[in-house]
Image (cartoon, rainbow, N blue to C red):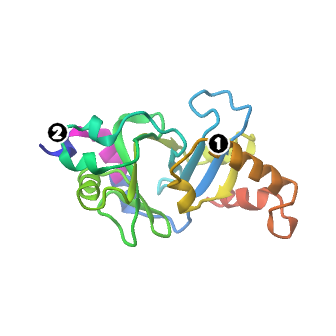
Amino acid sequence: MSFARLLVAALLMVSASIARAQSQDEAILLVAHPAFRDLEYRQTVLIAAPAPNGGHVGVIINRPTKRSLGSLFPEHEPSKKVVDPVFYGGPFSRGALVALVKADQTPGSGSVLLMHNLYMTFRANTIDHVIETTPNDARYFVGYVGWRPGELKSEIDRGLWSVLDADVEMVFRKDTDGLWEELLQQTRRIRAGVDAPDGAPLQFVASRIARR
């Protein structure tokens, strides 16, 4: 049975667009404001990166589900080797699988470089290959998050998100309970000038978005 047939065709169109051009800018972490009213993103932490259409793409990294990859694809034997649960990545294409892959080179077509040694992969056959060769060097998500050009900057300007530099170890942290609270406190210390270089406010990070 081909694992690729289980994935949504619409997501392949997204991956094809992303694969055509990769941004030189690295990923960022987004920490939801405590007053975020949208239950989809309440108390969430996301990793996001520029997409070639001028928008952004990412996944929620602190919403593990109670399902394993093997339980989702019981006829695909390599999936049973994946230790971590499948995560809920976001409301876009909920029926499709997305992977964040730790690798020193691209894992295959339909992949976008988020930051050093971290790729986001949409293409079904590439995800299939990762699962069959290095199943636990990746984290798997159902769905993802997308922003139109200028949309993420607008959300940050409105105070919906705080911005931090992305860290691979944070993205792959085993226990994500309390991650939102931890990073929220970090952003508050940055605003107070405690953690920021030379006392720079949080906007020194958020200004990266304005250039995209």
User: Is 211 above or below relative to 77?
Assistant: below
Which percent across, then down, holds residue 90? 48, 37
Residue occupied by mark 2: 75
First in residue order: circle 1 vs circle 2: 2
Rendered position, 107 above or below 99: below
Residue 59 position within the rendered picture, expressed as x and y whole percent measured from the top left: 50, 45
Q: In the picture provided, is 62 more to the left or to the right than 207?
A: left
Query: In the rendered structure, which amino acid carries the disc numbered 1?
Result: Gly
**C-alpha distance separating marks 1 and 2:** 34 Å
Q: Position of residue 75 (x, y in %)?
A: 17, 39
Residue 76 appears at what percent x and percent y? 19, 44
Range of magenta residues? 6-15
Q: Residue at x 36, y 59 (%)?
A: 111
Residue at disc 1, secondary structure: loop
Residue at 39 percent across and 36 percent down: it is 93
Position of residue 143 in the picture relative to residue 49 (left or right): left
Q: Residue at x 36, y 61 (%)?
A: 20
Q: In the image shown, does 178 or 180 lie closer to the viewer?
A: 178
Q: Residues within 10 Å of mark 1 (few under 14, many from 20)?
A: few
Asked if residue 138 lies in the magenta stretch, the reply is no
Which residue is disc 1 drawn over? 178
The chief SS type of the magenta part is helix
**Residue 76 appears in view:** yes
